[in-house]
Image (cartoon, grey):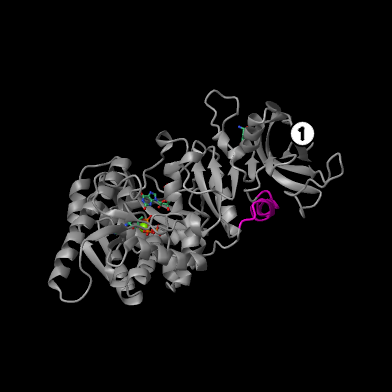
């Protein structure tokens, strides 16, 4: 079966646990080169493809720490170019027997790198820095640095405090840099990564969504064969809509989309999604009302991880039941597709996967996304996830190419476990109703103020606490709604959105007036990290 690596040159990024590892991946892809992130503990023998180049990420560790992570030494004899970033540089130095030592002062922030143009013999040594000038502003974040350059390496860049800020091997395409080219604070970082990926590794720059569509449709057809049938979990969110449209293009009516009303959707969501997919996109969608089943299983549950697990598992139960129903119904029909439904389509994205593949392992799990960690262990349907390698902005680009209407492509994400993870206490029909109303007003006012597209995600959260208020001269004792809106490139980090005060005033006044059970509204001003986007 054709794999993504057979179709696109791949840069392998080994993750040593840096908070910027995924950014390296993104930067390569922005250069139209496919890049994949893997834990630094991956063994080369287990790799199903040969990368065109390898980038070693930063890390919170020091190379001589007892538990410091180290890459498979096989990478150095694979014969492909390697670029080490920060810890990655120190890792190369450690492997080639140079020396790393603590700096006198931790260096965190901007620095100026002086680039060396020529080595002692007068030969140009700047393949990595070609065209980037003699000095470069860069961003540093380290407490260790090279104190001794390994034999057979030479300096290609230094700063006032780091004499070995950039090094290269004398004869092999091995490079290490102390600074972080992947962050936007290194203005020429993108160009530098381009030097490595395009010029040194010689990757083809063909990772575009136009290329992806054709190749992915072929791949889906190959996976499903002539007769294979697929049931699709579709929520009305961007990811699953794009996945559904792609699947529909690939296998037509052998694909059946199912939206599950799990009782914790937004106000009128099921109806709207039904109209949108059936009428606007021509994808045959069935809405299944399973709210009673979900709400009964969620009864009394407060723990966020348990809520996610229950919802993830119940989704699969519902899909299996629906698959059986579709199979049965199609047996009775004269025309149309027949046979077993073997596959379940999900709109899983790369960031959902990244969290679960970090080399730090399960101990660092922050939350189990319902569609990755929350799946049933013994499920019969096989998963098909065409967007598993894509970031959100790539999915949106794909959506535009597939002619999915702009308002849908720009939709804020809405988590599968829905309002259940925005009700901080137990989930009941009454609590869901209160939150649906508050959420509806909030989003409506954001749209009216023309702010929807400036905000990456906005949500209302129902707190399980009561506060005292006064209404019509009477004392009230009711619940509190928290509002949250964030801006974010990829939801791995996020900042809170600064609303004009008059908008917040109007939203607050409408919620307290129109939603019975709420007498107070607060606004969340926490970034991610240290908070997360969702409260649970
Ligand atoms: N109510 C639902 N009915 C059916 N499938 C769902 C439902 N909610 C979520 N899913 C499945 O879980 C996947 C992950 O949900 P997620 O919210 O991350 O993606 P999305 O809803 O497609 O897009 P977005 O992130 O923009 O909301 C979806 O792609 C879809 O396959
Ligand atoms: O489908 C989903 N199932 C989940 O279990 C889940 N948890 C968080 N999210 C969404 O992921 C993004 C990052 O959220 P956090 O900062 O809260 O992890 C935000 O966009 C969240 O809405 C989920 N989506
Ligand atoms: N950002 C990093 O990779 C840091 C690496 C190493 N721990 C240091 O402090 O130097
Ligand atoms: Mg969603």
Is residue 310 covered in magenta?
no
Question: Percent position (x, y) of residue 167?
Answer: 73, 39
Residue 290 lies, with reference to residue 169, above or below; the image says below
Q: Is residue 306 visible?
A: yes
Instruction: Indicate left or right for 44 with 372 as reference.
Output: right
The quadrant the C terminus occupies is top left
Q: Residue at x 17, y 69 (%)?
A: 330
Q: Nearer the viewer, residue 155 or 203?
A: 203
Q: Which residue is mark 1?
A: 161
The quadrant the N terminus occupies is bottom left
Q: Residue at x 68, y 26 (%)?
A: 101
Q: Which residues are magenta?
A: 185-203
Question: Percent position (x, y) of residue 410?
Answer: 46, 65
Q: Is residue 533 visible?
A: no
Instruction: Indicate left or right for 172 with 37 as reference.
Output: right
Quadrant of residue 93 in the image?
top right
Residue 143 lies, with reference to residue 206, above or below; the image says above
Is residue 194 covered in magenta?
yes
Residue 291 lies, with reference to residue 138, above or below; the image says below
């Amino acid at each position: 079966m054709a794999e993504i690596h057979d179709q696109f040159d791949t840069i392998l990024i080994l993750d040593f646990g840096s908070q910027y590892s995924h950014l390296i991946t993104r930067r390569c892809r922005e250069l139209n080169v496919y890049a994949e992130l893997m834990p630094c503990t991956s063994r080369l023998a287990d790799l199903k493809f040969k990368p065109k180049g390898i980038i070693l990420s930063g890390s919170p560790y020091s190379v001589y720490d007892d538990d410091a992570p180290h890459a498979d030494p096989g990478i150095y004899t694979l014969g492909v170019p390697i670029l080490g970033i920060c810890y990655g540089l120190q890792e190369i130095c450690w492997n080639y027997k140079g020396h790393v030592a603590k700096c006198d002062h931790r260096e965190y922030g901007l620095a100026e790198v002086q680039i060396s143009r020529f080595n002692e013999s007068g030969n140009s040594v700047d393949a990595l820095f070609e065209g980037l000038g003699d000095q470069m502003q860069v961003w540093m974040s380290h407490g260790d640095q090279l104190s001794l350059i390994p034999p057979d390496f030479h300096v290609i860049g230094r700063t006032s405090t780091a004499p070995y800020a950039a090094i290269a091997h004398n004869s092999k395409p091995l490079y290490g840099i102390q600074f972080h080219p992947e962050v936007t604070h290194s203005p020429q970082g993108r160009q530098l990564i381009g030097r490595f990926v395009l010029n040194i590794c010689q990757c083809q720059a063909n990772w575009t969504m136009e290329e992806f569509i054709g190749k992915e449709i072929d791949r889906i057809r190959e996976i499903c064969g002539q007769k294979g049938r697929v049931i699709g979990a579709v929520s009305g969110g961007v990811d699953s809509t794009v996945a559904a449209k792609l699947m529909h293009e690939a296998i037509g009516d052998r694909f059946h989309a199912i939206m599950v009303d799990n009782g914790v959707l937004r106000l009128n969501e099921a109806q709207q999604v039904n109209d949108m997919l059936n009428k606007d996109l021509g994808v045959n969608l069935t809405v299944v009302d399973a709210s009673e089943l979900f709400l009964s299983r969620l009864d009394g549950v407060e723990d966020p991880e348990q809520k996610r697990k229950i919802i993830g598992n119940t989704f699969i139960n519902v899909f299996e039941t629906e698959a059986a129903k579709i199979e049965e119904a199609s047996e009775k029909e004269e025309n149309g597709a027949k046979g077993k439904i073997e596959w379940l389509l999900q709109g899983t994205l790369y960031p959902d996967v990244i969290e679960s593949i970090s080399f730090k392992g399960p101990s660092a799990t922050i939350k189990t996304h319902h569609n990755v960690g929350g799946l049933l262990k013994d499920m019969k349907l096989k998963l098909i996830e065409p967007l598993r390698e894509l970031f959100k902005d790539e999915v949106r680009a794909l959506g535009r190419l597939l002619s999915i209407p702009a308002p849908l492509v720009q939709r804020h994400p809405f988590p599968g476990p829905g309002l259940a993870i925005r009700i901080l206490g137990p989930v009941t029909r009454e609590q869901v109703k209160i939150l649906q109303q508050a959420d509806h007003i909030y989003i409506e006012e954001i749209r009216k103020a023309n702010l929807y597209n400036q905000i990456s995600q906005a949500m209302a959260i129902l707190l399980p606490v009561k506060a005292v208020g006064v209404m019509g001269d009477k004392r009230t004792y009711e619940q509190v709604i928290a509002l949250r809106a964030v801006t974010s490139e990829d939801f791995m980090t996020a900042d809170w959105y600064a609303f004009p005060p008059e908008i917040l005033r109007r939203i607050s006044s409408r919620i307290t007036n129109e939603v019975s059970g709420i007498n107070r509204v607060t606004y969340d001003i926490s970034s991610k990290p240290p908070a997360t986007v969702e409260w649970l």
